[in-house]
Structure formats: C-alpha cells, structure tokens
Image (spheres, rainbow, N blue to C red):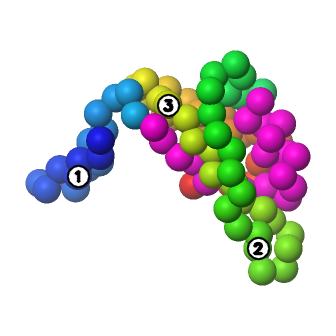
Amino acid sequence: MVIINETTQKLELQYPCTWCYKVVAYERAGIEIAAMEIIGERSYSLNPSNVSKGGKYISMNLELLVHNEDERTYFYETLKAHPHIKMVL
C-alpha cells in the first residue's frame, strides 16, 4: 500500500510490497542478464515496456516483492550500477 504523507509530501510504503522498476538498456538481453545476476533465485517478473523513438534503447518493467526500504534501495542502486543497464526509474 502506498500512502503520501500530506504534511511532508513523503512517500510512505507499507512493507512488504510489490515494487516496479523501469529498467532501460540497449537490448533486452542486457536487462535479462542484469535481473538474473542481481535478483537471483527470488521471484520477479520482467515485461516489455517501450522502445525509444530511434530504436536505440529498450525499457522493461521489473517487478518484485521488497521487504523493506533498504532492500528496495539496494535493488535500485545495484541495477543502476550494472554495466548492461543505462538507467533505472
């Protein structure tokens, strides 16, 4: 469940929750490799999202269950730092 605190405008999540990362790379295989290496044995889904106008980039939605803020941040930072990944949103 997602709640936005009215006074601080801070996103407050109730864990565990399903989180979706939009992962951008040059090719689908790069995203699949990064997901396997980082997520490992955990259950996740990877679905096509968009292709850039010029066809240079592809994005996919990576969805998985996260148990706390540290874990959610860890996956974001680790995906972002992977050599096959251009950007994570």
Between discs 1 and 2, the one toward the N terminus: 1
Would residue 6 be found to the left or right of residue 23 on screen? left
Rendered residue at 84%/79% (across/down) = 54
* Image quarter (top left, top right, bottom left or bottom right) of the C terminus: bottom right
Hey, which quadrant is residue 38 in on the image?
Answer: top right
Between discs 3 and 1, the one toward the N terminus: 1
Hey, which quadrant is residue 76 in on the image?
Answer: top right
Rendered residue at 85%/73% (across/down) = 55
Nearest the viewer among 72 and 45 is 45
Which residue in the protein does label 1 denote?
4
Which residue in the protein does label 3 denote?
65
Which residue in the protein does label 2 denote?
52
- Residue type for callout 1: Ile
Q: Which residues are magenta?
A: 18-36
* Image quarter (top left, top right, bottom left or bottom right) of the N terminus: top left
**Is residue 80 at least partly visible in the picture?**
no
Magenta stretch encompasses residue 27? yes
Q: Position of residue 37 (x, y in %)?
A: 78, 27
